[in-house]
Image: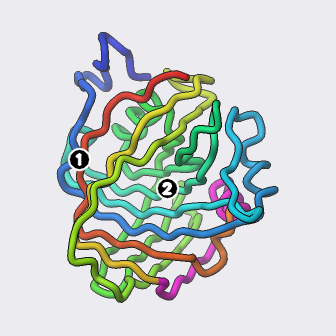
Amino acid sequence: MAERIGAGTWLIQGETITLPVTITDARITAAIFTAPAAGARRLLDGVPLKPLTVAGRAITLLMFIHYGEWALKTYDEVGVGLLVRGPRGLPGLHIVDLPVTGAFTREAGQDFWALPKWLMQADLTFGRDSTSVTVRDEGAEVMHASVRTGRVRLPFGTRLQVPSWAYLRHGAQAERLLRGRLPMNLSGIRVGRGAYAVRLGEHPMTEKMRALGMLERPLLTVTAARMSGSLGEFRQV
């Protein structure tokens, strides 16, 4: 487990990391879905958050990310997210599953930001026309998905600071409700509603994906050739 040794400073696997840390070289593909609110509520059982709903539907997000070398090393990540409301009705993105291909970032994510990272094996490919990923857990396939790149290329980048809620039952932040911001400064963006295909095995992650409507065609897909930003501390609420 990582150890906090000062304000925003952690000792992890013999290295000292001071927040914020800067993402300089990443790629992302994301798909946005809707799902019945009841399934989203079940996933939040015991978590002090409620799904944010529109016309009775929850809004969910599936992300595939490759990180080049930065403070948390280089690795691939698959995120399963849900838009929620926390105390005082404040909205934010809550990550319910976040497998990664690196042990260093798994420990850092759990302890710094209460993110539900676990160690996967994965094949993640950003092609010209589509993004595809296969996730495995101890050699067994968990899921395979492909997202076709949207046809509309935006002539500009965008700078986002996505509000986030985090809650984990283990790790250095166990049972603390945290709030922070996820940096998503994106360029080389393509959007659309391209073809989507998914194959799910039997696994806790895929149970969440089913509950969050990720078997259906997404409402929108977004691919960015570059993602950067500065990721700071999440504060206890």
Q: Is residue 75 left or right of residue 212?
A: left
Q: Position of residue 96 (x, y in %)?
A: 59, 48
Q: Is residue 171 above or below residue 225?
A: above
Q: Amino acid at mark 2?
A: Gly
Span of residues in magenta: 193-211
Q: Which mark sits nearer the N-terminus, 2 or 1? A: 1
Q: Is residue 119 above or below residue 187?
A: above
Callout 1 environment at 10 Å: few (<14), some (14 to 19), or many (20+)? many
The N terminus, quarter of image: top left
Question: Residue visible at 34% across and 74% down?
Answer: 125
- Comparing 133 with 177, the one in front is 177
Q: Position of residue 108 (x, y in %)?
A: 38, 33
Indicate the secondary structure of the residue bearing disc 2.
strand
Q: Is residue 56 left or right of residue 87?
A: right
Q: Is residue 143 left or right of residue 113?
A: right
Q: Which mark is residue 3?
A: none
Q: Position of residue 91 (x, y in %)?
A: 57, 44
Q: Position of residue 145 (x, y in %)?
A: 51, 75
Q: How is the image coloured?
A: rainbow
Question: Residue visible at 81% across and 56% down?
Answer: 38
Q: CA distance from mark 2 to mark 1?
A: 17 Å
Identify the residue position indicated by label 2 in the image: 79
